[in-house]
Image (cartoon, rainbow, N blue to C red):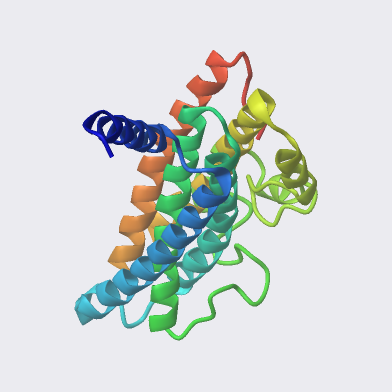
Amino acid sequence: MTGEAEAAAESGAGAAVDATAGAGPPGWARAIILGGSALALLLIGATVGLLIGRSETPTQAVATPGPVDIGFSQDMSLHHRQAVEMGNLAYVRSDDTEISQIGFDIAATQQGQVGSMQGWLALWEAPGQAPGEVMSWMPHDGGSGDAHDSHGSMDHAMGAGDAVMPGMATSEEMRKLRSLSGEKFDVYFLQLMVRHHEGGVPMAEYAVEHAKVPAVRALARSILESQGAEIELMKKMLETRGAKPLPF
């Protein structure tokens, strides 16, 4: 091969590499990557949860978690799992970088938190999901605090369609989300996620005040802080898209 031919071949190869480097992963690849990341976060969270539980001293009452510690870990895990599903959808399906990023952040954060809570439940030899009625560990009449009052009637919120807990999307709403694309998908995702975050606030507030285990109270407080910031951010994102949050 002549010098000119070699130079041309090298130039072509370089161009091919540049083109490959500039292309983003296809949707199926993003889904595989996300699935692997979610599993890793779940395992890491569970391991951390177990380690935290075993490292606490008896004076911190970790050996005797109360109904609030167990109930919160069970029900918030269930609540989080739907947010993880919606976040994954946004990451894989949205063409808007801002939507895709917040979807990934929510899914990754809450998957790790689910891992921690499930790790605690395993340590306490409690089932990963409540065997009976959800949220039985906290009053539904708002009598022991104002956590429920700021978000309306708990009984009313729990009666919305087939939603298991306040703020959660119904099966019909999830089907609708999956059927949308483009900006309509982005707006509906934000609306469902804002309401979903708002629905988890009373549980976290109650756990902060009544959980016995320090690590549970710390996680509940972290959820309030992080999701509060995300609610405000997503409301602004809706505003820029000419939309409003769904009523809670």
- Check the image and report above or below for 32 versus 46: above
Residue at position x 44%, y 35% from top?
23
In the image: residue 39, left or right of residue 182 = left
Residue 35: x and y in percent read 50, 59
- Measuring 35% from the left and 57% from the top, which residue is drawn there? 219
Quadrant of residue 246 in the image? top right
Q: Position of residue 161 (x, y in %)?
A: 80, 48
Residue at 40% of width from left, 59% of height from top? 112
Residue 149 visible in the picture: no
Give the answer, above or below, for where 19 lies relative to 242. below
Give the total of numbered labels: 0
Residue at the extreme bottom of the image, as rendered: 125
Q: Is residue 197 left or right of residue 4?
A: right
Residue 232, image x, y percentages: 45, 27
Q: Quadrant of the C terminus?
A: top right
Between residue 164 and residue 15, name the one nearer to us: 15
**Residue at position x 54%, y 45% in the image:** 87
Q: Position of residue 99 (x, y in %)?
A: 51, 31
Of the 4 image quadrants, the one containing the N terminus is top left
Closest to the observer: 32 or 225?
32
> Which corner quadrant of the image does residue 247 belong to?
top right
Of residue 239 and residue 142, the one placed in the foreground of this image is 239
Q: Residue furthest front?
A: 2
Can the viewer see residue 170 in this picture? yes
Residue 124 lies in quadrant? bottom left
Q: In this view, does 24 lie above or below 159?
A: above
